[in-house]
Image (cartoon, helix red, strand yellow):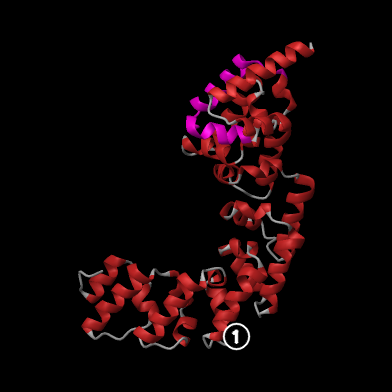
Amino acid sequence: MEMASTSNGSSMMWFFRDKGFDDKSIHEMFKKCKRLEEMQKERASENWDYLNSIGIQERKLPNLISKCPKIITLGVDEKLVPMVECLATLATKRTEVASAIAKFPHILSHSVEEKLCPLLAFFQALGVPEKQLGRIILQNPRIISYSINTKLTEIVNFLAALGLNKEGIIGKVLVKHPYLMGYSVERRLRPTSEFLKSVGLSEQNLQTAVINFPEVLCRDVNKVLLPNFTYLKSCGFEDRQIVGLVAGYPPILVKSVRNSLEPKIKFLVDVMGRRIDEAVAYPSFFQHSLKKRLELRHKVLTQKKIDCSLSEMLECNQKKFWLKYGSSLV
């Protein structure tokens, strides 16, 4: 029996080398998955070919299998096909299943009945429409490895405690940003929510921010939110004005200062000759592209000698702007 195992192990070594793996990667995989020593080359080839057939490119397979060597040992008909077919029913595009597996190959090692089905039922109970279940699972396939009873329920309870307990609201938040479920409540989500409250956001402001831009909860306070808040203060915004900016456009606390906030504020003040108060009245100013919208529209208005508010300048689409101000520069 031991000799057969050794023989199979040697055969698998040659199989992996033939597929482009280096010896270091092969040894690491054998450490991760002892079952490889008992695997037969023919079974491994069958799994390899199946993964390739569902849309995973040959060149990406070595990296995928290095992450989760167990999937090369699983039965195609018993394990791989049921999961892939179930995921396919959730997808809107054929490529989504292969993309999800490439992100988190371990999803194939989980059971449809024991893990995926209870997970889908959990999200449906939160009001996630059936057509949107796929977005959650396929965008963040790692979710299948999370415990429903501990991790996921803790996050749902946290969101409910923020006041997002109206029917279907939590489901909408999770659909909008499935990666939120990968964060720790105590190490990330709660400290971020407490920071947002500490700078003056009301309970309603915080709820609106999380519903419209749940990513804001996932950012590190000291690395992202506090530096952005400090920068806005250095520009002359008062605390209450920053609260208004965050309430109106939550991404302002997570946008790059160097690449987004600073160039736009300089353009607003130095080029457009406007006060920063105008951005407070129209926080969505920070949403618009500097090159594609702000500079072009400012050029049109300057040429036409037209004076208007930021909202009048930016809220309409290109066609309406052209009809209103009559220029082909837009």
Badge 1 element:
helix
Asked if residue 55 can be seen in this view, the reply is no
In the foreground, 288 or 261: 261
How crowded is the residue under tag 1: few (<14 C-alpha within 10 Å), some, or many (20+)?
few
242 in relation to 214, above or below: below
Q: Is residue 215 left or right of residue 150?
A: left
* Residue drawn at x 66%, y 46% as measured from the top left: 123
Q: Residue 176: x percent and y percent?
A: 56, 55
Q: Residue 85: x percent and y percent?
A: 57, 28
Quarter of the image where one finds residue 186:
bottom right
Task: Judge whether residue 108 is colored magenta.
Answer: no
Give the dominant element type of the magenta stretch: helix, strand or loop. Answer: helix
* Residue drawn at x 60%, y 32% as measured from the top left: 65
Q: Residue 57: x percent and y percent?
A: 47, 32
Question: Quick one: quadrant of the C terminus?
Answer: bottom left
18 in relation to 123, above or below: above
Q: Is residue 248 left or right of residue 11?
A: left
Task: Judge whether residue 40 is colored magenta.
Answer: yes
Identify residue for label 1. 240
327 in relation to 70, above or below: below
Q: Is residue 81 left or right of residue 312?
A: right
Name the kind of residue labelled 1 in the image: Arg
- Which range is magenta? 38-66
In the foreground, 46 or 212: 46
143 in relation to 155, above or below: above
Question: Quick one: quadrant of the N terminus?
Answer: top right
* Residue drawn at x 74%, y 62% as measured from the top left: 187
In the foreground, 121 or 303: 303
Asked if residue 308 can be seen in this view, the reply is yes
* Residue drawn at x 54%, y 31% as measured from the top left: 61
Q: Residue 252: x percent and y percent?
A: 53, 72
